[in-house]
Amino acid sequence: MSEAAALEQLTAELKAIRHDVEYIKEHMVDVDMILTKGEEKRLEESLSEYRQGKAVRLEDFEKEMGR
């Protein structure tokens, strides 16, 4: 393979990689948005407690504390 052909092939491969990277960046999930099983369970417990009136919103708590 000539140097020009090798350079052309390398350029094409880099363009394909760039395209793949852009696709991945557009479709990747924010890892901070994924809950572990434990976090998911605690969230459900917290929401249940709130619905039952056993908990208060942070904003309400801060108002009570005068913040």
Image (cartoon, helix red, strand yellow):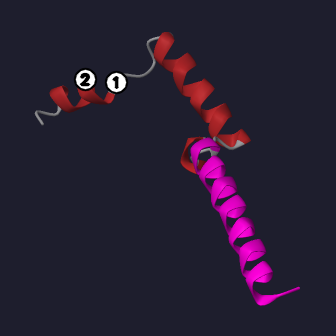
Image point 25% across, 27% down: which residue? 59
In-front residue for pair 62/21: 21
Q: Quadrant of the C terminus?
A: top left
Q: In the picture, residue 37 is in which quadrant?
A: top right
Q: In the picture, residue 36 is in which quadrant?
A: top right
> Mark 2 belongs to which amino acid?
Asp
Q: Residue furthest left?
A: 66
Q: Is residue 36 magenta?
A: no
Residue 14 screen position, x and y as percent = 68, 69
Taking 21 as reference, is 53 above or below it? above
CB contact under 8 Å: marks 1 and 2 = yes
- The residue that mark 2 highlights is 60
Image point 63% across, 61% down: which residue? 18
Please tell me whether the stretch drawn in magenta is mainly helix, strand or loop. Answer: helix
> Mark 1 belongs to which amino acid?
Arg
Q: Residue furthest right?
A: 1
- Whether residue 26 sits left or right of residue 56 in the image: it is right
Q: Is residue 10 magenta?
A: yes
- Whether residue 20 sits left or right of residue 62 in the image: it is right
Callout 1 environment at 10 Å: few (<14), some (14 to 19), or many (20+)? few
Q: Which residues are magenta?
A: 1-27
Image point 17% across, 33% down: which residue? 65
Q: Secondary structure at mark 1?
A: loop
Taking 13 as reference, is 65 above or below it? above
Instruction: Compute the Cα span from label 1 to label 2.
Output: 5 Å
Q: In the picture, residue 64 is in which quadrant?
A: top left
- The residue that mark 1 highlights is 57
Q: Quadrant of the N terminus?
A: bottom right
Residue 16 screen position, x and y as percent = 71, 59
